[in-house]
Amino acid sequence: MSFRLLPRPHSPLLSYVSSTLFRRWNSSAPFNPHKPLQWTSSPSPGWKLGDGASKAFSEHEHALRKTWDLDKMSTTDSYKLLTSAIIPRPVAFVSTLAEDGTPNLAPFSYFSMVSHNPPLLSVSFSLSSRRPKDTRENILATKEFTVNIISEHFIEAANATAVEAPANVDEWIISGLTMEPSSLVKPACVKESLFSMECQLHFAHDILDLENSNITNTLVLGLIKQVHAKESILSKNGMVVDPGKLRPVARLGGNTYARLTDTFDVPRPAWKEVRDAVNELVGRQR
Ligand SMILES: Cc1cc2nc3c(=O)[nH]c(=O)nc-3n(C[C@H](O)[C@H](O)[C@H](O)COP(=O)(O)O)c2cc1C
């Protein structure tokens, strides 16, 4: 009996490890998980009504504007362009069960909050011609899912679940993450996630290709029935989440993610406080 200790020269394991190492060597700054989030001033703290953009616009001011007609672009190019610009996108880490009980876990960045009354979130599934999205199938069949916010401490594990594995492959095992039983729905929450939402299917809408009416995406609205937050991420009053403790990861274009590094407050103007200044500004324009 011979034992193979090293992976074969062209094995997927070897290429995954070498590409990961290559990226690591190539990355410029090492990650410091303990660096606190900085509270900074806003970009132009002296801004007054009518001031417009800051001087930072000057580097773009004379650049030519390139224009694309989306109906003349390939869907691959429009995907790359739009996902590089509509950023940063939060990532829903969605846990579902197939009708036969097979668990599934995958990340989705076509994700947002839709309303708080009722509390709804949206996730959109792009349909691949190669295979269905198991998460979509499971939600439409079972009407239940959990959405878990991804923090820096498990981004690699979450990213690994995006692998296009056959439906019977359990991505929980690939990730090494842990199931935390939910209270109201059958799919588990992700124990390592600091903020999880138990959802019921509220609405699903197929989006059609404008040329041949094939389904290209399915938009799902989830009714958030219950949320779970680790007390360690809550602000002092215990009712909201402190972003510096949640340390959420956002998706940019391609394989690029982003973390929060600093935050700033910009107070929202109250009409009664700015009315006189606005009237004066408008009067000057006449
Ligand atoms: C960060 C990230 C975000 C993603 N966002 C989406 C998305 O919004 N919609 C989508 O259809 N696929 C998205 N994908 C791809 C799916 O995660 C991938 O196709 C996965 O295999 C789907 O798993 P499933 O078939 O088990 O549902 C994303 C992948 C990554 C890594």
Image (cartoon, helix red, strand yellow):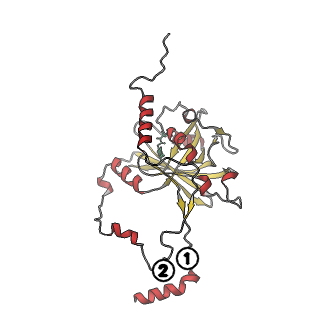
What kind of residue is marked 1?
A: Pro
36 horizontally vs 128: left or right: right
234 horizontally vs 106: left or right: right
How packed mark 1 is, by other alpha carbons closer than 10 Å (few <14, some 14-19, many 20 or more), is few
Quadrant of image for the C terminus: bottom left
Q: Nearer the viewer, residue 113 or 246?
A: 246
Q: State whether residue 244 is above or below residue 217.
A: below
Measured as percent of width and height from the top left, residue 272 is found at 58, 83
Quarter of the figure with residue 239: bottom right
Residue at x 58%, y 82% (from the top left corner): 273
Counting residues from the start of the chain, the first of labels 1 and 2 encountered is: 2
How packed mark 2 is, by other alpha carbons closer than 10 Å (few <14, some 14-19, many 20 or more), is few
- Answer whether labels 1 and 2 touch (C-beta < 8 Å): yes
Q: Which residue is mark 2?
A: 49
Residue at x 40%, y 53% (from the top left corner): 84
Q: Which residue is mark 1?
A: 269
Task: Confirm or reject: label 2 Cβ below 8 Å from ligand 1.
Answer: no
Measured as percent of width and height from the top left, residue 221 is found at 55, 52
Secondary structure beneath label 1: loop
73 horizontally vs 107: left or right: left
Q: Nearer the viewer, residue 221 or 66?
A: 66
Measured as percent of width and height from the top left, residue 94 is found at 56, 44
